[in-house]
Image: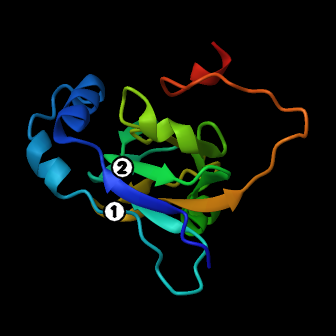
Amino acid sequence: MKRIAQFEKVSYERFENDWSGIFPAKTDTRSIYDSIKIPSRATKGSAGYDFYTPIAVELHPGESINIPTGIRVRIDEGWVLKLYPRSGLGFKFRLQLNNTVGIIDSDYYYSDNEGHIFSKITNDSNEDKTVEIKAGEGFMQGIFVEYGITLDDDATEVRNGGFGSTTK
């Protein structure tokens, strides 16, 4: 196996700013931040790194939540992190990432937002099932994938930001 990345927490200041922007009523951001778990694989043969929700989440059918994970990742150039719902949650509850597959590029780490990874998820159940995820429980998985570029590629721009920043 190639070792090409390292997960870490964003700074507390970054997390507090991002968290309060989404959850202004939740004031104990320090204890939430302190409880954040670094993504990990469950078994030696697992391809995916489980991401853990920092708070308990309950989603009724059709409901969504945007979760600041408190996590960033340093990735070697030529690699990307792809994010998917954990298989069991997708299968049992039709839990979906709102952008279907999250893409974390290697240069996202250096953005002004410290490369803070967010995940907007929706309970897309058509069986009237409520999704309940406990604080600290895995809800999403990330898989590192190597990629190539075209022979005539001439991209020189530098990223600064998250969603949509590469097309500005």
Q: Secondary structure at mark 2?
A: strand
How far from the left and from the top, in percent, is residue 104? 57, 44
Residue at 22%, 41% (x, y): give it.
11
Labelled disc at residue 71? 2
Give the CA separation, mark 2 to mark 1: 7 Å
Residue at 39%, 39% (x, y): give it.
116
Residue at 83%, 32% (x, y): give it.
153
Above or below residue 93? Residue 16 is above
Residue at 55%, 26% (x, y): give it.
159
Furthest residue in direction top, as rendered: 168
Q: Is residue 119 among the parts visible in the rendering?
A: no
**Other residues around mark 2 within 10 Å, as few (<14) / some (14–19) / many (≥20):** many
Q: Tell me: 27 left or right of 75.
A: left
Above or below residue 25? Residue 58 is below
Quadrant containing the C terminus in the rendered view: top right
Q: Amino acid at mark 2?
A: Ile
How far from the left and from the top, in percent, is residue 167? 67, 18
Q: Secondary structure at mark 1?
A: loop
How far from the left and from the top, in percent, is residue 147? 76, 52
Furthest residue in direction right, as rendered: 151
Residue identified by numbered label 1: 38
Q: Amino acid at mark 1?
A: Ile
Quadrant of the rendered image containing residue 47: bottom right
Tags 2 and 1 touching, CB below 8 Å:
yes
The earlier-in-sequence mark between 2 and 1 is: 1
Q: Is residue 109 among the parts visible in the rendering?
A: yes
